[in-house]
């Protein structure tokens, strides 16, 4: 019998496609703004059952199918920014799940069901690898489904949000074993009982971590609710500035000492617009407040080549018209930046072809290289622009440099009233808990919020309202295991996964 052509072998629907489709739906429904965070524990048994025993090729195909469906359902909102980018993102992003499925299928085909024990290690390793390069987009971490389940989120202080991911997959595997034991009532009851005991123990441990906090510094986050189409329209800058001037005046009247404007609240290359630099300086002086605002920056190097940056500018009454500048390090893949375009010629040529010949939307911002903290009234703080809050090591580095609190500035109006702004607003919860630090988030159209070191929202706005929030914050708590040692669990899971891959490749014996 003739074998099917390679393209039909790889691109046909995987075995158990309906089961994997159901797994992807449960996975996707677990993320914000859905309140069904508990569904994430039940997608794991379906994923495990779908890839078990399929071998690498079958598992790879099943995992890729899961990745495409789940990315489409959870990341569709990227299309509001870039149609090209969302297609590339889904196609590239899905390979991570393909390798999880392929390696799990290969291991279980060779060693049977016990090899499913590898799955939590593979999943955490995948999330770790996914955060390491310029094509990184670690948005779909399993842990983020638990943002409103704060007792479980407290695990993050141990070794980052990876601990929550590991816990979810491990508990899901216990559910899978319990399901496989249903023919024996007592055995099934024992396994389901173990699931309840483990979950309850972890939940109660997390609930004991909360404590009262002292506060002594007042910070405000402004939400101008200026639509993107209006913000960048010629002649609209004065209108934008009047909105933020009014909100700053109100925040200062509410005793705010630091006022945080959102990403690109100044919709221009700010240093090339001296009247607007003066305007912000006058607002700061008149209200005696420090101001952080997002804006764009453009530099020319010695050869005259222009370099574009997404940046944050810090004004104080003492500095005058000489703001300090922070350039965004981590750029949105395919949205703000074509990966490696600044260093690989053919990628740069492809980006320019897409922009100039096809008139498609791929931005050409460059990553910044500045790392420093600012100080307001004696308190050091770091600024994260939008996407950067999803990188635990980067946030940890700011904390270990001495930040007393962090602020995040973003403009989620690009994503409209979709799931994107809600998912984005859930991520600072984990950065706060990992480092036991306060985080102030200012979003152009929402959601703006203030998080305490336990991930609790002290105040939060609704999506699509013009307002400000002001809250008292305090010093960060003592160092956590994560802030001391970093993502040890992620690195350990990567080592275990690499060892498993080596053993699977080297050992070609029969099923154990």
Image (tube, rainbow, N blue to C red):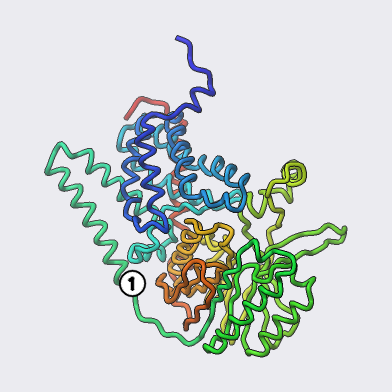
Q: Quadrant of the C terminus?
A: top left
Residue 374, by quadrant, is bottom right
Instruction: Work out whether residue 494 can be spotted.
Output: no
Depth check: 425 or 493 in front? 425
Residue drawn 64% across the image and 74% down it? 293
Task: Examine the rendered structure and indicate whether residue 252 appears above or below residue 94.
Answer: below
Q: Is residue 413 left or right of residue 182?
A: right
Instruction: Work out whether residue 92 can be spotted.
Output: yes
Q: Is residue 388 left or right of residue 57?
A: right
Q: Position of residue 492 (x, y in %)?
A: 44, 51
Q: Is residue 245 left or right of residue 273?
A: left
Q: Position of residue 145 (x, y in %)?
A: 40, 56
| Total count of labels | 1
Residue at disc 1, secondary structure:
loop
Q: Quadrant of the N terminus?
A: top left
Neighbour tally class for label 1: few under 14, some 14-19, many 20 plus, Cα within 10 Å: few
Residue drawn 50% across the image and 59% down it? 417
Q: Is residue 425 left or right of residue 373?
A: left
Which residue is denoted by mark 1 in the rendering? 209
Task: Examine the rendered structure and indicate whether residue 187 appears above or below residue 378.
Answer: above
Residue 290, by quadrant, is bottom right
Q: Residue lying farthest left? A: 186
Task: Examine the rendered structure and indicate whether residue 42 appears above or below residue 431.
Answer: above
Depth check: 215 or 99 in front? 215
Depth check: 258 or 223 in front? 223
Residue drawn 53% across the image and 78% down it? 468
Q: Position of residue 504 (x, y in %)?
A: 43, 33
Residue 107, by quadrant, is top left
Residue drawn 57% across the image and 60% down it? 387
Q: Position of residue 420 (x, y in %)?
A: 50, 57
Q: Residue lying farthest top? A: 1
């Amino acid at each position: 019998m003739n074998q099917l052509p390679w393209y039909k072998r790889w691109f046909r629907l995987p075995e158990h496609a309906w089961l994997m489709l159901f797994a992807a739906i449960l996975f996707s429904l677990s993320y914000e703004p859905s309140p069904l965070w508990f569904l994430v524990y039940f997608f794991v048994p379906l994923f495990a059952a779908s890839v078990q025993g399929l071998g690498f090729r079958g598992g790879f195909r099943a995992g890729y199918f899961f990745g495409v469906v789940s990315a489409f359902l959870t990341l569709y909102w990227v299309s509001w920014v870039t149609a090209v980018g969302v297609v590339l993102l889904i196609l590239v992003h899905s390979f991570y799940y393909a390798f999880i499925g392929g390696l799990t299928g290969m291991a279980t085909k060779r060693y049977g069901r016990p090899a499913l024990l590898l799955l939590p290690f593979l999943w955490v390793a995948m999330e770790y690898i996914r955060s390491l390069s310029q094509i990184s987009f670690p948005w779909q971490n399993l842990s983020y489904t638990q943002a409103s389940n704060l007792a479980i989120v407290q695990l993050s202080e141990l070794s980052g949000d990876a601990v929550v991911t590991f816990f979810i997959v491990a508990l899901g595997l216990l559910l899978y074993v319990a399901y496989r034991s249903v023919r024996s009532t007592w055995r099934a009851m024992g396994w389901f009982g173990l699931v309840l005991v483990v979950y309850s123990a972890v939940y109660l441990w997390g609930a004991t971590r909360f404590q009262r906090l002292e506060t002594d510094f007042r910070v405000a986050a402004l939400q101008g609710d200026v639509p993107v189409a209006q913000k960048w329209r010629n002649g609209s800058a004065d209108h934008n500035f009047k909105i933020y001037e009014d909100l700053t005046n109100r925040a200062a009247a509410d005793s705010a000492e630091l006022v945080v404007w959102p990403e690109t609240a100044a919709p221009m290359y700010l240093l090339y617009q001296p009247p607007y630099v003066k305007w912000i300086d006058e607002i700061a002086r008149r209200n005696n407040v420090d101001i952080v605002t997002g804006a764009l920056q453009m530099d020319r190097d010695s050869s005259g080549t222009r370099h574009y940056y997404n940046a944050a500018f810090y004004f104080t009454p003492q500095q005058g018209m000489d703001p300090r500048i922070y350039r965004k390090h981590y750029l949105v893949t395919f949205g703000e930046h074509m990966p490696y375009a600044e260093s690989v010629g053919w990628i740069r040529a492809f980006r320019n072809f897409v922009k100039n010949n096809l008139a498609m939307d791929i931005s050409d911002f460059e990553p910044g290289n500045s790392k420093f903290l600012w100080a307001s009234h004696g308190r050091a703080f770091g600024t994260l622009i939008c996407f950067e809050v999803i990188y635990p090591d980067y946030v940890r580095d700011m904390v270990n440099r001495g930040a007393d609190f962090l602020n995040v500035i973003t403009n989620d109006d690009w994503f409209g009233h979709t799931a994107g702004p809600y998912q984005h607003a859930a991520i600072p919860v984990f950065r706060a808990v990992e480092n036991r630090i306060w985080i102030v988030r200012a979003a152009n159209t929402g959601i703006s919020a203030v998080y305490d070191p336990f991930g609790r929202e002290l105040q939060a706005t609704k999506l699509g309202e013009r307002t400000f929030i002001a809250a008292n914050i305090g010093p960060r708590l003592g160092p956590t295991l994560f802030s001391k040692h970093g993502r040890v669990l992620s690195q350990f899971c990567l080592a275990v996964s690499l060892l498993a891959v080596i053993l699977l490749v080297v050992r070609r014996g029969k099923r154990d």
